[in-house]
Image (tube, rainbow, N blue to C red):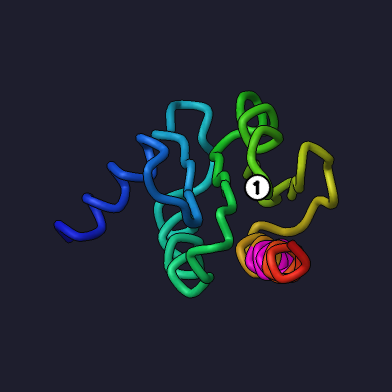
Amino acid sequence: EEVEVGLYILRSLGLRHGPWLISCPTCGRCQVDLAPLARRVEAALRELPAEAALKVAVMGCEVNGPGEAKLADVGLAAGRGRAVIFARGEKLTTVPIESAVDVLIEHMARLAAEAGQQQQQD
């Protein structure tokens, strides 16, 4: 865990790049069990190459969640039984909460592949 914390600190200081998870601390408005969703997304982020410096948001409510998710490269804002998926500030789709993480991971992989192709061109 110390290595992960060290990498987190370096990323927060802008000294290291790589995928970045943003998740809300949850509050009374949260209508889903957010921690398991965030853990699944975090595990998927570990599989992405470090060059894929994606910012991924996993938010637990439909009040503040959309705004935060829109600031990320890709994200979800969960609500009662459903989640809104965002990419680069645009709403992509609304999906059942059961499939939200899988849909988010698909978009993460697509954006990571696009980033890899762009780096090869540069």
Residue 87 is situated, as x and y percent measured from the top left of the image, at 76, 48
Q: Which residue lies furthest to the front in this view?
A: 122
How would you rate the neighbour count of disc 1 (Cα within 10 Å): few for under 14, some for 14-19, many for 20 or more?
many
Q: Which residue lies furthest to the bottom in this view?
A: 47
Specify the principal SS of the magenta part.
helix
Q: Is residue 32 above or below residue 89?
A: below
Residue topped by disc 1 = 76
Tell me the quarter of the picture where residue 90 sits.
Answer: top right
Residue 99 visible: no
Tell me the quarter of the picture where residue 97 sits.
Answer: bottom right
Q: In this view, does 74 lie above or below 46?
A: above
Q: Which residue is drawn at 51% across and 35% down?
A: 30
The answer to whether 85 appears left or right of 93 in the picture is left
Residue 28 is situated, as x and y percent measured from the top left of the image, at 45, 26
Magenta region: 105-112
Residue 78 visible: yes
Q: Which residue is drawn at 78% across and 67% down?
A: 121
Query: What type is the residue that disc 1 sits on?
Result: Leu
Residue 58 is situated, as x and y percent measured from the top left of the image, at 55, 46
Tell whether position 109 is magenta. yes
Foreground of the two, 84 or 16: 16
Q: Quadrant of the N terminus?
A: bottom left
Foreground of the two, 117 or 42: 117
Q: Quadrant of the C terminus?
A: bottom right
Foreground of the two, 12 or 92: 12
Secondary structure under tag 1 reads: strand
Q: Residue at x 23, y 51 (%)?
A: 5
Q: In this view, does 40 lie above or below 25?
A: below
Tell whether position 75 is magenta. no
The answer to whether 80 appears left or right of 9 in the picture is right
